[in-house]
Image (cartoon, rainbow, N blue to C red):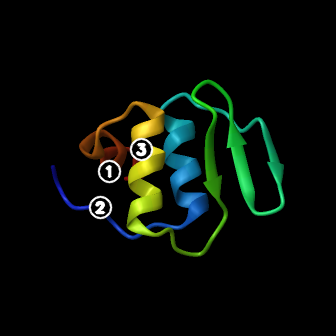
Amino acid sequence: MSGLPRVSGREAVAALIKAGFRVRRQKGSHIIQPFAQTVVPDHPELDRGTLRAIIRQSGLSVEQFVALLR
């Protein structure tokens, strides 16, 4: 498994949208996406553990997620 990049919450959401997810709603700084009920905090930089959990909940591999960031 490759290392995780440092990304913001908005960058993570943009990558998930490229993967076919959509934004369902936002409450405060949490952006909620349907399907896997993935919640992405809208923070300037996500902790690696939080990002890893988001990737796992979305069903993507780390490599697939990193490719979507480009």
Residue 60 found in image quarter:
top left
Spot the residue most to the left: 1
- What residue would you read off at disc 1? 66
Q: Residues within 10 Å of mark 2 (few under 14, many from 20)?
A: some
Spot the residue most to the top: 35
Q: Residues within 10 Å of mark 1 (few under 14, many from 20)?
A: some
- What residue would you read off at disc 2? 4
Query: Residue at the spot x=44%, y=49% of the render?
Result: 53
Q: Amino acid at mark 3?
A: Ile
Q: Are marks 2 and 3 in contact (CB under 8 Å)?
A: yes
- What residue would you read off at disc 3? 55
Q: Position of residue 68 (x, y in %)?
A: 39, 44
Query: Residue at the spot x=57%, y=28% of the render?
Result: 36
Q: Residues within 10 Å of mark 3 (few under 14, many from 20)?
A: some
Q: Amino acid at mark 1?
A: Val
Q: Nearer the viewer, residue 22 or 39?
A: 39
Q: Are marks 1 and 3 in contact (CB under 8 Å)?
A: no
Q: Secondary structure at mark 3?
A: helix
